[in-house]
Image (tube, rainbow, N blue to C red):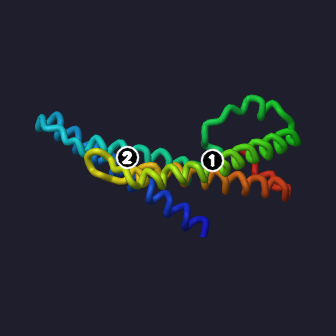
Amino acid sequence: MARWLRRGADAVGVALFATLFVVFLVQIVARFGFDRPLPWTDELAVILYVWVILWAAAFMVPDREHVVFDLAFHAAGPAMRRWMLGLGSLIVGALAGWALPACWDYVHFMAREGTPVLGVPFMWVFLPFVLLLVTLVVRAAWRCWALLRGHEGAGA
């Protein structure tokens, strides 16, 4: 099941990036080839960029590939590393969980406003941020559970 979900998330990410690339090419051809810039390409490229970045951070990039400052982590011993992983996961999960209701309220509120050119409700533009917060909570809970069960594979 996990493999199927990961492949599905990767397929969505690839489709988003491919669409962004095509829109970018259309934008370049229209602007420099025909000297007729298309406003919708600018807007759609920005929306797709937001989606690509947040979708990838939420569902495609594994924890070990995220950018981290781990100088102190690697200097610590195994017991301290487990403690640091647990505390860090607890903090990240708690903060993301605390922010989730307010972020959802704002994103849901923005459904009434649309983008200037395409009229896409801003709820759909910013929805992947809510998805990112949800995955942060789930990942943090999963890591804490794995650490409590004594799994060393829960590390970074």
**CA–CA distance between discs 1 and 2?**
22 Å
Residue furthest right in the image: 79
Q: Residue at x 33, y 52 (%)?
A: 19
**Horizontal side, residue 39 vs residue 135: left or right:** left
Helix or strand or loop: what does disc 2 sit on? helix
Which disc number belongs to residue 99? 1
Q: Quadrant of residue 38?
A: top left
- The residue to which callout 2 is attached is 47
Q: Nearer the viewer, residue 97 or 150?
A: 97
Residue 66: x and y in percent read 61, 41
Which amino acid lies under the numbered mark 1 shown in the image of this protein? Ala
Please tell me which residue is depicted at 61% across the width and 65% down the height of the picture: 2
Q: Quadrant of the N terminus?
A: bottom right
User: Which x, y percent locates residue 140?
Assistant: 71, 51
Which label sits in the foreground, 1 or 2? Answer: 1
**Which of the pair 155/115 is nearer the observer?**
115
Q: Nearer the viewer, residue 124 or 62?
A: 124
Q: Is residue 29 left or right of residue 150?
A: left
